[in-house]
Image (spheres, rainbow, N blue to C red):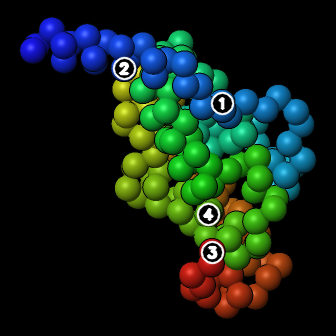
Amino acid sequence: MKKKILYTVIIAFVCIQFYRPAKNINTQAQPNHIANVYPTSTEVNRILKKACNDCHSNNTVYPWYANIQPVSMWLTNHVNEGKEEINFDEFGTYTVRRQYKKMKEIIKQVKEEKEMPLASYTWIHKDAIITDAEINTLASWAKGMQDSMKSIYPIDSLERKKKAD
């Protein structure tokens, strides 16, 4: 009985290897990228690239183990969820209110709660760990973007709570 279960598990593992979810790879220019919409320093771009872009852009750099199921499915789901939350390559398509809110969330997630980048990501990607100085750089930049948006648009229209954003 135990051999049948073992063989069934092995066969299922082999069969699932043939399922290949689409990868998040796009090497084309991204005209709506945040750096094309708002002033973004080289340092901020470097931080975003090393710690954020794999899950929050249209181009993920996949590790070797992304070709093994069920890890590939888990990574695909994780990247899709990250892109739904914020996609730096699509940032220019967001409403100004949503952009403002996302800047506020960056400050909260990175500086106040220190939840980003995720521990499950930095556990393997040690180069994605951001220092306190990088956290401050990113938070200052996001705050500056919020201040810039406030100077152009009425504050009420940016801070009004709306379910759709």
Label disc, if present, on residue 33 of the rendered structure = none
Q: In which quarter of the view is residue 37 placed?
A: bottom right
Q: Amino acid at mark 3?
A: Asp
Which callout, 3 or 4, points at the residue further toward the start of the chain?
A: 4
Q: Earlier in the sequence, mark 3 or mark 1?
A: 1
Q: Nearer the viewer, residue 45 or 81?
A: 81
Of mark 2 and mark 1, the one earlier in the sequence is: 2
Q: Secondary structure at mark 1?
A: loop
Q: CA distance from mark 3 to mark 1?
A: 27 Å
Residue occupying image coordinates x 73% and y 30%: 25
Position of residue 40 in the picture relative to residue 54 (left or right):
right
Image coordinates of residue 140 in percent, x first then y, are 61, 55
Query: Which circle, 4 or 1, is nearer the viewer?
Result: 1
Above or below, comparing residue 127 to residue 157 in the picture: above
* Residue beneath disc 2: 12
Q: State the residue position of label 4.
A: 102
For the N terminus, the quadrant is top left
